[in-house]
């Protein structure tokens, strides 16, 4: 699957403007373009966007457990 040029270009702009990872910028741009109301995520990078709500699906303890799992 290829990323549409306007979305990928807009994603780079979002990433640069908000100092976030390029993929997070792309996901944010697509959410904005598609009129998404809520983004479910495991980190807080999306909380800075006013165009949609953000729901973090892991508690801090669950997030630490996930990181420990991924390190092994």
Image (cartoon, grey):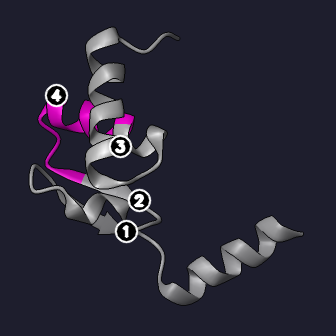
Query: Can you say which quadrant of the picture contains the C terminus?
Result: bottom right
- Evaluate if marks 3 and 2 touch, with contact meaning CB atoms under 8 Å apart: no
- Evaluate if marks 3 and 1 touch, with contact meaning CB atoms under 8 Å apart: no
Could you tell me residue 32's position as x and y percent?
Answer: 17, 36
- Evaluate if marks 2 and 4 touch, with contact meaning CB atoms under 8 Å apart: no
- Left or right of 69? Residue 28 is left
Q: Earlier in the sequence, mark 3 or mark 2?
A: 3
Could you tell me residue 47's position as x and y percent?
Answer: 25, 65
User: Residue 62 is drawn in which quadrant?
Assistant: bottom right
Marks 4/1: CA distance? Answer: 20 Å
Q: Tell me which residue sits at (42%, 15%) in the image.
A: 3
Q: Earlier in the sequence, mark 3 or mark 1?
A: 3
User: Residue 50 is drawn in which quadrant?
Assistant: bottom left
Q: Which residue is mark 2?
A: 41
Q: Which residue is mark 3?
A: 15
Marks 3/4: CA distance? Answer: 15 Å
Q: Secondary structure at mark 3?
A: helix
Dominant SS of magenta comes to: helix
- Evaluate if marks 3 and 4 touch, with contact meaning CB atoms under 8 Å apart: no
- Left or right of 4? Residue 32 is left
Q: Residues within 10 Å of mark 4 (few under 14, many from 20)?
A: few
Q: Earlier in the sequence, mark 3 or mark 4?
A: 3
Q: Which residue is mark 4?
A: 33
Q: Which residue is mark 1?
A: 44
Q: Which residues are magenta?
A: 26-38
Q: Secondary structure at mark 2?
A: strand
- Check if residue 32 falls in the magenta segment: yes
Q: Residues within 10 Å of mark 1 (few under 14, many from 20)?
A: few
């Amino acid at each position: 699957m290829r990323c549409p040029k306007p979305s990928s270009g807009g994603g780079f702009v979002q990433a640069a403007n908000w100092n976030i990872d390029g993929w997070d910028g792309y996901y944010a741009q697509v959410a904005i373009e598609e009129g998404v109301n809520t983004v479910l995520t495991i980190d807080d990078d999306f909380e800075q966007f006013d165009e949609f709500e953000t729901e973090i699906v892991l508690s801090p303890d669950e997030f630490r457990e996930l990181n420990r799992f991924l390190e092994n």
